[in-house]
Every structure is written in C-alpha cells, then in structure tokens.
Amino acid sequence: MNFWGFINLKFLLDVLFAIGFGLLLFSRVKEQRTLWLLRGYLFLVSLSWFIQRYAYLPLTSKLIDAVVLACSLSLAILWQGELRRLMELLGTGRLAVLLGNPPKEFRARSTTVNQLVEASGKLSQNRKGALIVVDLGSDLRPEDFLYSGINIQAQLSTDLLINLFATDTPLHDGAVLVKGNKIISAGVILPLSRQGISRYGTRHLAALGITERFDRCICIVVSEETGTLSLANQGKLERPITSSRLQELLIKLVGNQNPLGSPKSSANKSTSSQNINTNDNITVENKFDNQRNTKD
C-alpha cells in the first residue's frame, strides 16, 4: 500500500512540475507565432509520453519520437538566440530574470525619462551619434557585452550624457549603460544583430543585438549622419521617431513615471517645450533617412 502511494505521489509531482514548467514557458513567450510552435511541440511531447506509458504501440511510438526529434532540431536552429540567452542566464544564476521578476533597483525614477528625452533630442539636433542602453530588469553585466567599457557610476543627467557622446572624447563610439537613475558605464561595445545587416548601420545593429538577447532592456539610437531617433525593444526597431514619440514610448516601457505636463517639476515643462521645438527639424531629417541607409 505504501509502495502504490509513493508511486501515485511521484506521478502527481511529475505532472505538476511539467504543468508548471509549461506555464512558465507560455508566460515568457509573447510572439503569437512562437507561441503556436511551442504549443505544437509540447503537444507532440505529451502525446509521445502518453503512448509510451499507457499504450503498447511500438511503431506509432517510434514515429512520434522521430517527429519530436526532428522538431527539436528545427526549433534549436530557429530559437538559437533564445536558447543561448537561456543558457547564459542559467550559467550566471540570474533566475529572477528568467522568472520575470525584475529587481526593484533597476526601476527608473520620475526624472529619468525627461533626462533621456532631452539628451536624445539635443544629440539628434546636433547630429551626434549616440547609443543609450536602459536596463529595465535584465541585470546586465560586463560579460553580456563584447567590451564592458569604462565604469562611470554617476548620477544620470542630460549634460553628462551629451558630454559622453561628444565627438572629441574617446567614449563616443560606444554605448552608455543606464540603470535606474544612474549611468553605470560608457564606451560599451554591444553584440551585433544578424538581422537587417544590409539595411541598418552598426549602431542600429548593436541596438537590435542587445535587445534580442535581453527583453528587459531598451536602446535609444541617434544617427550621426541624419540625426534620426530610433528605439529598439525586444529585437524590433521603431524608426524614425520624434522626441515626443520617444517620450511616449519611454513612459510606456519604463513605467511608474509622472504623466506628461506634470506640475511637479518646472524643468519637465521646459524640457517638453524644447522637444516640441526640435520635432520639426527631426521630422525633416527623418524623411531623408527613409530614402537612404545609414552607415552609423
């Protein structure tokens, strides 16, 4: 009696763990097509397990196992980037990122969006290339980059961001990493994406590359040739955008920010007015960017 009770308990735990793992996978997948593929694959795996356990159908079992193996190889090729990221997170012990539980210290403060938008708008107006990575909970570490850059650990400010991307400084070609309301490092070299190599320049490929590997970070790109503003998120690039559109996207993605026109800070109001004045210039530049590929 105890033996059968142990067997039933073991079976129950097995089913519960499998269901929990499946729900975790489904919660982490947001793209509809990827969700369909994952459902089909898990259905084949469940069917193979059911036949092997409850039905003596050796030929059918072999055929389903062959289909599951072929699907596993296909998905490994199709999801090589996601699987690589999964192994990296497991190897570095960042289980909170896998479980979708970002640490609180990475949440930006109320002034972060305004400072990022103001700095990006001025860099765009002056046509100074820039690459700003904002960590929203991916817990980015030096080993996640090709080169971790120079440690800054300074309070985020518009003037500091603009100075870091000045063309006469040695750090202007790299990216700046922002966590919360602090600039962590500058001169960071990001991994490049393999998508759109003939369509995008190096800065845009770098923005796509880091957001493909880590879905809880975003990257602001300023084109050096045209001053075009872009925003990369989850391996997708929205471009061209204006300063006001960038502010809307950042408020939506960063969250917990003061609404537009908040009376808490008079500096925020002046920032918004400056962005409106620069939007016309950026929009004109965006038209030229749609007609030719950038090299930066």
Image (tube, grey):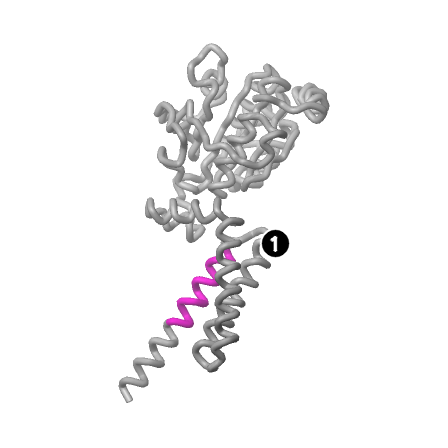
- Report the side of 5 relative to 59 (left or right): left
Residue closest to the far front: 59
Q: Residue at x 52, y 69 (%)?
A: 64
Quarter residue 197 falls in: top right
Camera sees residue 266: no
Foreground residue among 26 and 111: 26
Query: Above or below — where is 170 with respect to 14?
Result: above
- Give percent across and percent down for residue 101: 42, 50
Which stretch is magenta?
A: 14-27
Q: Which residue is disc 1 drawn over?
A: 33
Q: Is residue 177 magenta?
A: no
- Report the side of 224 relative to 147 (left or right): right
Foreground residue among 138 and 77: 77
Foreground residue among 38 and 97: 38
Query: Above or below — where is 143 with respect to 35?
Result: above
Crowd class of label 1 (few under 14; some 14 to 19; many from 20; radius 10 Å): few
Residue type pointed to by label 1? Arg
- Give percent across and percent down for residue 177: 43, 30
**The N terminus lies in which quarter of the figure?**
bottom left
**The C terminus lies in which quarter of the figure?**
top right
Q: Residue at x 58, y 26 (%)?
A: 201
Q: Residue at x 38, y 49 (%)?
A: 96
Query: Above or below — where is 83 with respect to 261?
Result: below
Camera sees residue 273: yes
Please give the count of numbered marks on the rendered protein. Answer: 1
Q: Secondary structure at mark 1?
A: helix
- Give percent across and percent down for residue 237: 60, 35
Foreground residue among 161 and 205: 205
